[in-house]
Structures are given as structure tokens and as C-alpha cells.
Image: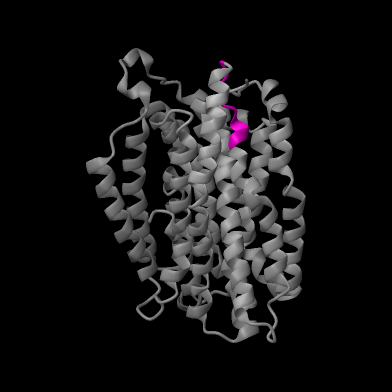
Amino acid sequence: MVTMPASIHAPVADEFNAHYHVGAIAGSLTTGMYLLGVGVGGMFVAPFSETFGRNVVYLATLVLFMLCLMAKALAPNYGSAILFRFITGCFGAAPMTVAGGAITDLWYPVQIPIAFPVLAMTSFAGPLIGPIVGAYIPNIGFRWADIVSLLGTALVTIVVLLFLPETYAPILLPPSHLDVDLPANLTRPFVLAREPIVLVFSFYLTLVFIVLFTFLNGFPFIFQDVHGISEPMTFTVWAALLLGDCLAIPTIPLIYKRIKQAAANADAKGQHLQPEVCLYFAMLGGSVLMPASLFWIGWTCYPDISIWVSIVGVCVFGYSVVMIFTTCYLYIIFTYLQNAGSALSFMTFSRYVVSGALIPASVPMYRNLGPHWSLTWVGILASVMAPVPFLLFRYGPTIRAVSKFAKNKT
């Protein structure tokens, strides 16, 4: 529910633009500024959670997140609406950034490959559900996009307050174990940004999120203009992405079976479980299917080709995205362990800031290049990144061995 506001505004953009008398590019900043806010906020919430604990960060940011949602819904002008979207994004970064560190609090390393994929594949549904919910909001007013998000977040806040215990060990241990070096914690994400593994996965996820969130502006060009379907139906096509996400869930026990076997073999040799086992998710079609699906969607969106052909391509893209996302996060968690939250915060910063900045550019891109060549160019970039999981599977141990900050080196 907390990740849904990232995309729920796209279907109500026309009504928002008309109300505030702005054009499509300026209106797309409602999404772009939110993503920028998530990127900036992610740099602070993880270090704060590594200093003061997970729950205080969750609860404080959720309360402020709801207040900003209400402020955005009541914004009297365009400037204040955009400003509050940015601040809302800043406070909405906690669940996406702190959760990775919380996983290492709760689970043994051998259990993380089954715990985190469940978290990732369910939480990833938020941005995919957003456009589907928002598609029918214009009938009751664009401000309801924020109100619906507010009501969902309120429910989540109640659950966190009543049922989620603190998980960060230094908070639970005597005060002597507490790390109160906040300045060091705040600078750690920038230090870890120099790690080759963090840089590669940051670029990979940035590319994934650029494609995903520019679809908010691109789907009308791909489906509405080509096939003549209505705007609500155009955004309902995001259900195909959600289906792709769901199709990834059955792979979890299959991959976990192999990981348990690898853990048993490593234990028999007196070794640690290697992070390379996390690459199975992307290697199981994810990295290869991402460029394939982009070419598929781009070159099947013609009036004389059934719309269902492109929709199937969207479903395949949804599967590939969540598999790549799961691999990137798992590998970072396994490699950096206690410092994973800081590494993930830089990855959050890079992908959300870049994708947020490019959201307004996606309107002229799709308009001038058309959906065929727009998706072809990003498909080419995705093709370049497709071998990354396979190369890391081969050379990952060597790279980790020379890392200054990797906790799991052998």
C-alpha cells in the first residue's frame, strides 16, 4: 500500500493538469517528483534505522507520509502540489530501503533466499496496482488518488504499531552495543557507492525502473493510440505486469531447493553460503526476457496485430523485472550483511532519482520516436546488461575477495 502512490497519479493526470492549468510534461512531474523524493529520502532512512532502530523509522515516516498525502490532496496550486509530492516521496522511502536490512535481522543467511523474494514480489505489486486503482478514480475526482493512498497507509501504520516488533539487534541488546555514530552511518551509502557490485546493480535497477515508470506515459502511446482503447482500459493493462509478478512466485521454492543444497555442500566443506546462489532468480530467464519483452512489445503494437500479443509481452516484462529486482537485492544483502541497508539506500537513490528525472522526458520520447523505437533503444541497453548475472556467477567470488566492505568474502 505504501508503494502504490508512486504510480497511482498517472491515470488522473489529465484531470490534474486541467485543474492546475499545466501541460502534460509539467503534469508528469507528479510522478517524477515523488520518485526523486524516494531517492533522496532513501539516503537518510537506512542510516537512521541503523542508528535508532527499524520501528522508530517506520512509524515516524509513516505518520509524516500520511500528513503529506493529505497536504498534497488539499494543495491550492500546482507548486505546492509538486512540493508535497516530493516530500511525500522522501517519507515513503523507508519500507523500500529499511526492509532489506530488516530481513538480515530476522533470518539466517540460508533462509533469506526464501524470505526476501516473498517480500519483494508482494511489495513490488504496489506500483503495479497503482495505475489499475487510479484508472477509475477520475470519475470521483483526482484528489481521491491521495485519499485512497492515505487510507491504505493508515491501515499499514496500525498493523506496524500493533504487531511489528523491533528487529534491530543493537536496539534489543544492552546500550553498549548501540551504534550512535549517525554521521558515519549517513556517509556509509556514499562510501559503498564506490563498490563495483553496488555500481553495477545500481545501473541495472535504474534501467529497469526507467522502463517501468516511463510506461506510465508510454502505455497510452502503445495501447490507446494504436488500438483505440479507453484510458481506463489502457492503465488496466498494468494488470498484465502484476500477473507477471505473480508468475514469478512459484519459482521461489524451486530455486530455494537448489540454494539449500548449495548451503549443505558449503557447510560440509566448512564454508559460508556464497552470494552467487542469489543470481539464480535473474538467470532463470529474468535477465534475458527483459530485452526480449521490450522488443516484443515495441514491434507488435500495430493496429493489425491483436492487442493481446503486446499484453503477453507486458506480462513477460513483469516477470523479468521482479526476478532481476530480487536478484540485485538478495546479492547485496548476502554480500554486505549488516551494511546492506546502506548499500541498498544508494541503489534506491540512484534508480529513483534518475527514473524520476526522466519521467517528463518520456512524453516527448514516445511522441517523437514512437513506441517502436523508444522500446528498441531501452531494449538494446537491457541486452547489454543481460549477461551480468551470468558473469557475476563466474567472477563474483573474485570481485568480493578484493572488496573493502563486503562482509561475505569467502
Residue 275: within the magenta? yes
Residue 239 inside the magenta-drawn segment: no
Task: Please determine whether, in this image, residue 292 is positioned above or below residue 297.
Answer: above
Q: Is residue 59 left or right of residue 84?
A: left
| 103 lies above or below 371 | above
Estimate the x, y position of residue 132 in percent, counting from the top left. Answer: 45, 70
> What secondary structure is the stretch in magenta mostly built from?
loop
Comparing 64 with 399, the one in front is 399
Q: Residue furthest left?
A: 162
Image vertical order of residue 286 relative to residue 258, above or below: below
At x 72% / y 60%, what residue is drawn?
378
> In the image, what residue occupies the spot 51% across and 58% down?
247
Q: Which quadrant of the figure contains the N terminus?
A: bottom left
Residue nearest the observer in this picture, 113 or 325:
113
In the drawing, does residue 392 fall left or right of residue 92?
A: right
Q: Residue at x 57, y 30 (%)?
A: 262
The image shows residue 210 at horizontal and vertical percentages of 63, 57
Which of the 4 image quadrants contains residue 170?
A: top left
Residue pictured at 30% horizontal, 15% vertical: 174
Q: Residue 154 versus residue 66: which sits nearer the camera? A: 154
**Residue 116, relative to residue 128: is it above or below?**
above
Point out the stretch of residues depicted in magenta: 270-277
Question: Is residue 205 shown to the viewer in this render?
Answer: no
